[in-house]
Amino acid sequence: MNKFISSVVKNKCPNCLEGDFFISRNMYNLASFEKLHNKCTNCGMSFRQEPGFYLGAAIMSYAMQAGLLFLTYFFLQVVIVLSFWYFVAAFTVLLILLVPFTFRISRLLWINMLGTRPT
Ligand SMILES: [Zn+2]
């Protein structure tokens, strides 16, 4: 598997693919789903690159959720023609369930694309 994809899918350090990126492996552990290690426990790569590093990841997460809104709208309003309030309820539930997923995926994608690896 590609190193980039493997790091994102398996929650691993983008440099060595050994150390965990997020502290909790369970993305639905609401007490700690967003907490990440300061650096890799195996190679020492910093996961806290610089202040504001993950701002781009927040924008990426927002874009993923906006795309989800569009796809959900298309499927529920155009394909199966659900009433508006059922659509709002379905979308709200889906969004709450996917927030931890988009949060984690966007941060992992961001550090894989722009993270500075140790020399
Ligand atoms: Zn590492």
Image (cartoon, rainbow, N blue to C red):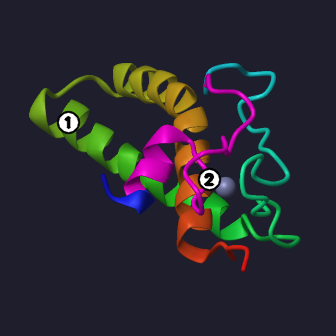
Residue 76 x/y as whole percent: 23, 31
Q: Is residue 43 magenta?
A: no
Residue 94 x/y as whole percent: 45, 27
Quadrant the C terminus occupies: bottom right
Q: Which three-letter amino acid code belongs to the residue tagged 2? A: Cys
The verdict on label 2 being within 8 Å of ligand 1 is yes
Q: Quadrant of residue 15?
A: bottom right
By secondary structure, the bulk of the magenta-drawn segment is best described as loop
User: Measured along the vertical axis of the image, is residue 29 above or below residue 15?
Assistant: above
Q: Quadrant of residue 84?
A: top left
Q: Which residue is mark 2?
A: 13
Instruction: Give the residues drawn in magenta, as a range.
Output: 5-26
Residue ID at (69%, 77%): 116
Disc 1 secondary structure class: helix
Q: Which three-letter amino acid code belongs to the residue tagged 1? A: Phe
User: Measured along the vertical axis of the image, is residue 93 above or below residue 35?
Assistant: above
The reply to whether residue 117 is in sight is yes
Q: Which residue is mark 1?
A: 75
Residue 32 x/y as whole percent: 79, 27
Disc 2 secondary structure class: loop
